[in-house]
Image (cartoon, helix red, strand yellow):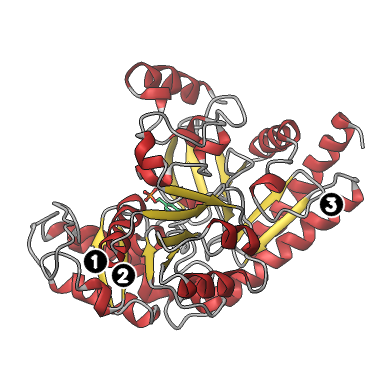
Amino acid sequence: MGKQSDALFQRAQDVIPGGVNSPVRAFGGVGGTPPFIELAQGSRIFDADNLQYIDCVGSWGPMILGHGHRYVVEAVKKAATRGFSYGAPTAAEIELAEMIVQAVPSMEMVRLVNSGTEATMSALRLARAATGRNKILKFEGGYHGHVDSLLVKAGSGGATFNVPDSAGVPKELAELTLIARYNDLDDVRAQMSDEVAAIIVEPIAGNMGCIPPNPGFLQGLREICDDHASLLILDEVMTGFRVAYGGAQARYDVRPDITTLGKIIGGGMPIGAYGASKLLMEYVSPLGPMYQAGTLSGNPVAVAAGRATLSVLRNSSIYDDLEERSAEFENGVRAASEKHAVPLTFNRVGSMWTIFFTEGPVTDFASANKSNREKFSRFFHLMLGEGVYLPPSQLEAAFFSAAHAKKDILQLVERVDRVLKKVAWEFGT
Ligand SMILES: *Cc1c(COP(=O)(O)O)cnc(C)c1O
């Protein structure tokens, strides 16, 4: 990395654990120093050494419009001049809630929180409150934020650093979390019982790399939940407004009981949301007995960024454009992989994707985990050297935004081609 980033990383490690405020950013999965970012615009980010990268991380999902979208920036500026936070209700919150409810019909009511973690934590509490049951079922490699009960066999940073079961989670709590294999309905059936309050699932896994649901998997979960009078929680923090305006539930036509959102609905500002039918949401305080609150919840600046982002996405051709460009990239990568005889698996749904360094198929955590990390790290660093910023872990999804123009995709394919050639040469084929 550049001199400035190196110096900043040294300094950061003195006062911030690992030098970062979220683990995967520290590059532990690939080695080396992370670039410290100073500026982002459109599809590009710029670091402290003034190096420029095509950004394929997009702040891990929120930046679907690209960085610094004019309309969003204006909305945020305007909101900021009216005060940062009131701790009192606003009209703008209703409008964001109405937009969400219109986009996602299974959410008749929605509560705004400050992060995806808060959303899934609250969704679990709601499921437990409504069913009077304590157990939950999640999937190996599924990540739902750093909620105690959900840090069991978790994806994202835990998987990257080989500690999917966090220290500090009481054993008594972890025991309430059942684990099944993603895309394996037989395994789910074997684990399920009438003590399970809810199944929580990423409808498209994104935190063990991108893994689409097998045909019928989500519908199968719906049926299994119905058979046991358990609730189905779709964690759409990543997929909501990403793979369709109505999220993965619209794309795959499955109706969950509870949905969690985050990332895109804040347009890059901190936010999260959970929602369900009115019947379920009436358990939530002050209507009902389930307590949940937040000093900064519904923050006016975050809500302004979210509203502006959703209103650009609504009725736009952005999803079609994203599909077209992402497919073009996928085709380019596949061609380069064949040309240089570097076996890989390209998983993609719309604009979320992962290049796994394994022959695949990659359908669950075990098959994702077969990827060659050494090759991935080398690929990652060569791409970084080419001015491409990828997620610094094999087990994370990458994203394109509306700001990734055709010419960005062409540049990316050229660079992948050059890099895979080197990888083939270095590793042999
Ligand atoms: C990012 C993510 C979360 C956590 O959201 P934070 O805002 O990081 O707390 C939860 N679930 C999924 C599926 C995510 O991708």
| Left or right: where 191 falls relative to 332 | left
Provide residue 404's location: percent of width, then percent of height. Answer: 58, 61
Provide residue 36's location: percent of width, then percent of height. Answer: 45, 32
| Left or right: where 257 falls relative to 327 | left
Whether residue 207 appears in this view of the structure is: no
Determine the secondary structure under disc 3: helix
Residue in view at x 75 percent, y 47 percent: 416
Structural crowding at the residue carrying mark 1, measured as other residues with C-alpha within 10 Å and reported as few (<14), some (14–19) or many (≥20) = many
The residue where tag 2 is placed is 275
Considering depth in this image, is 117 or 5 the residue closer to the camera?
117
Q: Which mark is residue 336?
A: 3
Q: Residue type at mark 2?
A: Gly
The residue where tag 1 is placed is 111
Determine the secondary structure under disc 2: strand
Looking at the rendering, in which quadrant would you find the C terminus? top right
Residue in view at x 57 percent, y 43 percent: 391
Considering depth in this image, is 381 or 259 the residue closer to the camera?
259
Q: Earlier in the sequence, mark 3 or mark 2?
A: 2
For disc 2, does the CB lie below 8 Å from ligand 1?
no
Provide residue 139's location: percent of width, then percent of height. Answer: 54, 52
Residue in view at x 82 percent, y 36 percent: 423
Tell us which disc is closer to us: 3 or 2: 2
Structural crowding at the residue carrying mark 2, measured as other residues with C-alpha within 10 Å and reported as few (<14), some (14–19) or many (≥20) = many
Considering depth in this image, is 342 or 171 the residue closer to the camera?
171
Looking at the rendering, in which quadrant would you find the N terminus? top right
Q: Earlier in the sequence, mark 3 or mark 1?
A: 1
Q: Residue type at mark 1?
A: Arg
Q: Earlier in the sequence, mark 2 or mark 1?
A: 1
- Between the C-alphas of marks 3 and 1, the distance is 46 Å
